[in-house]
Image (tube, coloured by chain):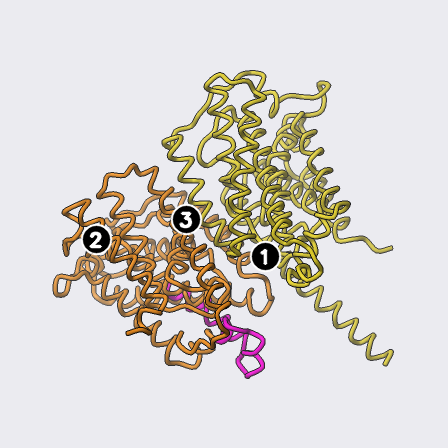
Amino acid sequence: MKSIIKQKEFSIFMIVVLLCVVLSFVSPVFLTFENFLDIIEGNVVMAILAVGMTLVIITGDIDVSVAAATTAVAVIIGNLFSFLPDSWISILILFLIAPVIGIIIGAINGLLVSKIKIPAIVVTLGTLNIINGLVLYLTNGQYLNSSNFPKPFLTFANFEFLGIPILVYLLTAVAILTWFILKHTLIGRSVLAIGGKSQSAVRVGINYNKVKLFVFAYMGFLAGIAAIAQTAYTKAVDPNGLLGVEMMVIAAVVLGGTNIQGGRGSIQGTLLGVLLLAIMQNGMILAHIDTFWQKVVTGAIIVIAVSYDQISYRRQQAKLAKIEVEA
Amino acid sequence: MKLSKESVLGLIAIATILLMSLIAPGFLSSNNINNLMFQLPEFGLIALGMMVVIITGGIDLSITYIAALSGVGAALMLVNGYPIFLAILVAVIFGLACGAFNGFIVSKIGVSPILVTIGTWVLFEGIILAITKGQSISGFSETYSLIGNGYYMGLFPLSMLIFAFFVLVTGVLLNKTGWGRNVYMYGSNDVATLFSGVRNNRVVMKVYLYAGLLAAISAIIMTSRYNSVKVDLGSSYLLQSVAASVLGGTKIEGGYGKVMGTVYAVIIFLTLSNGLNLLGVHRAIVDVFIGVILISVLTLNFFSDKIKQKKETTKASKVA
């Protein structure tokens, strides 16, 4: 029991619970099953991206091109739809093509970071510029609506199992897969090792370049999946729909207890971080707070959370040099 | 004779200007030259602020929102009939306050600059939205618009003079003062700097204050030039200023960066985007160009460093 309370995730969990209690007093609608499903379904895209970003941040890097990559994949599949037949094969093709495009984008980032050794923030700022520019040029900022989407895709998007939308299952699958990779595979442990102390990790025999490449390619893979989720959720492709989401994704990951310097972080924590931001936004809407003030609150919470994280981390470091086994 | 990195960049800047005046129609028209002269200061000031932060190994992603917030501060004063002097003062105070906020969290609490400034980016954007309700504020006095549109002695844009002044100040501060030396030292090794008796906190604090100040000055020029202010004032300069610093030779890990390098890089960017615009290239493609330039410059840097290293090791082995 004590070990559970001491975990970082627990404190985030308590904040979420506290927020829920407060909000259920503010609005009677808040504590309903439907509202919670809405919150989760509305943030599936962000959660999928945040799960991928967790790995990137654990290695001590950052990827600000995720939203652009997701938009690029969404635009490509949106244009592909008119060529796809009206059968279930289309969905299969979709789930093959979208991740592959994502992986290609991610691998380019990964190669530039690992082989050419350009800092990730610069690489991804560059690719962000390039992708956004190309998307804007090719689409002219035009919205694609669902009129030429294949029917099976719309059925897929509206599909519910046990009253829970398919997208939530998709997120669950992504989260479990990533958790498994991080916790139980060699490459996952290497990700944590590189983040903890890259020099020692390399001396132990971990291939630094391979791990970095994997992390960015995996991020791209999830951007591909997120593109499908985004298209299915909005049933449209909006080239400007995800502008600025990358910052929220990074914020969610950091709120979830992942250290920006690398080395620590968990999928559960990240999901809680996304949930915290999502509930906050939902709560502010239910509490009729002016939309303009919502950004102030979000920004303040990010600043406070990262400061608190740093302070508590320093205190812990000061107390004793303890080896972290649990990660 | 060996040219420094910055001089090479200066030659490239001249080459780009020559190239554009050859291929882009109307590039050398007085109208267009004027346009360029008026764009340079606002972008240049933000890029200089970003450069100083990057030299310490940090990054300030909130810099354009600091500018926008200062602009809003000045605009509110002007619209409510206060004198221009007070409006400028308020803008500077807003810029310094935002910089102090960033600086406090980075230096005292020790959170990494990327995170802090992502947070303050959202925060400042929110504050601007809460003040302006998403509307633009406009309608300033004629005298105020002289700052961004006026000429000195009928020849030189006033804003260019302001920019030149701050280029000089930044250069002197970085190269001739103790603070400047500490900034470079902190950027290359913060622990060693601390152990040699430097108060790191103060150095970093002043860096963010200075970035805030430059953002505020840039905001004054921008608001005066556009005669209005909105939440996205100058937001397109954010990525461009990082790109300009890096293209100008500033090391993103910190420890190196020269004022003139950044100025040349800003000139190159402005010339390119202006020339491409005149050639009828889509605005979005210009963004793509900037991204490509940024990445290819760094890739070239990597390979040239590698070749240099190889040469040195073969030389060393020969000596041995």
**Is A216 located above or below residue B64 in the figure?**
below
Which element carries disc 3, helix, strand or loop?
Answer: loop
Name the residue beneath numbered marker 3.
A244
Instruction: Point out residue A215 in the picture as x, y percentages from the top left corner.
Output: 45, 69
CB-based contact (under 8 Å), mark 3 and mark 2: no
Quadrant of the drawing holding the N terminus of chain B = bottom right
* Disc sitting over residue A21 in the figure: 2
Closer to the camera in the image, B27 or A268: A268
Which chain did the renderer colour orange? A
Magenta span contains residue B14: no
**Is A82 located above or below residue A1 in the figure?**
above
Look at label 3 and name its amino acid.
Answer: Gly
Closer to the camera in the image, B162 or A159: B162
Residue B106 visible, this angle: yes
Residue A98 visible, this angle: no
Q: Extreme left residue here?
A: A162
Chain B shown in which color?
Answer: yellow
* For marks 3 and 2 on the same chain, the one whose residue lies earlier in the sequence: 2
Closer to the camera in the image, A185 or A96: A185
Look at label 1 and name its amino acid.
Answer: Ile
CB-based contact (under 8 Å), mark 3 and mark 1: no
Which quarter of the picture shows residue B99? top right
* Disc sitting over residue B295 in the figure: 1
Q: What span is in magenta?
A: A193-222
Quadrant of the drawing holding the C terminus of chain B = bottom right
Look at label 2 and name its amino acid.
Answer: Val
